[in-house]
Image: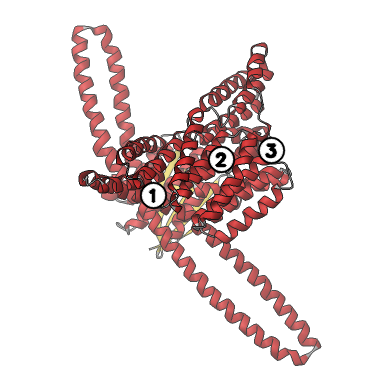
Amino acid sequence: MKSIQKSAFYLLLLLPVIGLSQRPENPDSLMHLLPTLKGIEKVKVLNNLSLSYLGIDYEKTKKYAEEALVLSENLGNDSLIISSLIYLSSAFENAGYYHESIPVNNRARELAKKIDNKDQLVSALSHLCLDFFQTQQLDKVLSTTDEGIALAKNIKDTINTINFYEMYANLYLKLKNYALAEKYWKEEIEIINQTDRLFELGRAYVNLSNLYSETNRNKEAIKYLEKSIPVFEKLNYQSGIAIINVNLGDEYLRTGDYSKSKLHYGRAMDLNKTIANPSIEGNAKAGLGKVALENKDFTLSEKLLLHAEELGKETQDLELLNGVYNYLEDLYMATHDFKNANLYHAKFTESADSLLSQSIKENITEYQVKYETAKKDQEILEQQNQIFRQQAWFIGLIIGVLALALLIYLFYNRYRLRQRAILDAAVIKEQKQGLQAVIEAQENERRRIAKDLHDGIAQEMVAMKLGFNLVRKKIEKANPKESSDMLDLENRLNDSCTEIRNIAHMMIPPILEHNGLISSIELLIRNSLQAAGLKTEFECFSLPAKMEEKIEIGIYRIAQELFNNILKHAKAKKVLVQLYKAGDSVILRVEDDGIGFDYEEEKKKGSMGLLNILSRVNALEGNFVSERATKKGTISTLRIQI
């Protein structure tokens, strides 16, 4: 089985934590100093205390960062708040809690933009790149990395420039372009060797070892992992050393050296006693369970693997769970416990399907990157073609004898361009098919979730509400004074029921299936724009009674995204929505009187809302234009041929 910890762990070392190479050496002296300080100085010491335990003791790292954040908020100092947020995010990241880190770093990014602090902004972007990568939000990784590297180069931040190039290398690794990823990492190591940045050096060793592991070059993977250990020992970075030992255990497991594998897993477990990272413990125990299985110690293997399963569920680590389920299936087959073997085979299949769904989502970014690469190649070919024509004209005037040779060359070059155009067309067609498959998968998942919410949780809560009503009436008779509190709880429960139904209807509105697109758009306007207090007009004419399901869903989702953008950004008071048929096309036109929207600028930034719209427009082979209105506001027009 493929390594179960690689994708879960090597990216923990993707970006440097704050000042790890400048970690305070004596936290006790800081603790002694703390009671004598107030204000800004106390915030700085609390953050230094958080840093001193980073990668060593998660609870203390988090505790001191949270205390620093509370104090900096009381002081109203935005710069100190940003620093404390970034220290807190580092605590989450080193413990593997990347979902918790995202809102923390998003807040730091917005505050840094507000006070125009470019140094703190680039740091927040660096951490967000790591969080998005670890949570498989690759589209956000790409846009955040582009933003970060432009800013880092602008302020001449060498370290974060290296970090963003590191992210690019990992994206190439995701795209399976191993040669280019290896090239970037080796060039990075050469640059880092000219500096004193130990952390970045160790990180590059670990990530390069992961590349070699993925390409089954295990000896080289082990070599670079072992080179990274003394680097992190100099930094006293216990989390990093523990992760490296897990990876070494995995590499030796793959080569069949079970004694060395067991040794490194054991070292990781010992280091994790103070770190308390459930992901490290889960992967180490899974590896030890596999070693015990190979050594036919079935009792120990079962104990270790079942504990690893609990830790995988706690951290929601699909890859860890997928590997553990595979090992447990092998274990129960070996012990002839076919009931449990069948159970874990089903769990293994289910987790594999979940990983596949996750992979499908990642393909959106992969297709975008491939398309952009093909587009750049086409531009280069066009430039080359122009140079060739100029040279042919110049040489033709001077030496007529060479004209024939140049003509043959140009014809050959045109033939090559035509062949490339055919290839590009095929690639674009494949991308569109893949994008359509992703969108269909998303809609199917929305339907499933909406059905589960409506038929499951919503029904249970309605039953609870009825029960509350009966209890309240009994209490009202026995103790009227207490009945008002029960009535308040009953009303809150009723509001929750309504909210769940609304969420289910927003994901896949039943009115779209039963009454069609027009009624769905009217309901969407009423529940979003009108509910927010905006004046609206909806005009609909000449529209077919029924269209293809994918077209109706696509128009509905695009309208939903446009309305969300108006509510979030436009500051509008009035919105005009038109939906009609013109010729052989259906047209959706949305006009607001807000502050306006720069379509081209947002497209360059890689706005997620705009990317979602354009993805659906491409899948429907339609056309989308957004431009400023004559006086004020924005006019967005969608045209889809039916």
Q: Is residue 508 visible?
A: no
Q: Give the structural element (helix, strand or loop) at label 3.
A: helix
Instruction: Choose top left, top right, bottom left or bottom right for residue 472.
Output: top left
Q: Position of residue 158 (x, y in %)?
A: 71, 44
Residue type, numbered disc 3: Lys
Foreground pick, 286 / 512: 286
Q: Residue furthest bottom?
A: 401
| Spatial CA span between label 3 and label 1 | 37 Å
Query: Mark 2 against mark 3, which lies toward the viewer?
Result: 2
Circle 1 residue: 355
Mark seen at residue 369: none
Q: Position of residue 548 (x, y in %)?
A: 32, 59
Foreground pick, 87 / 105: 87
Mark seen at residue 118: 3
Q: Position of residue 631 (x, y in %)?
A: 59, 46
Residue type, numbered disc 1: Leu
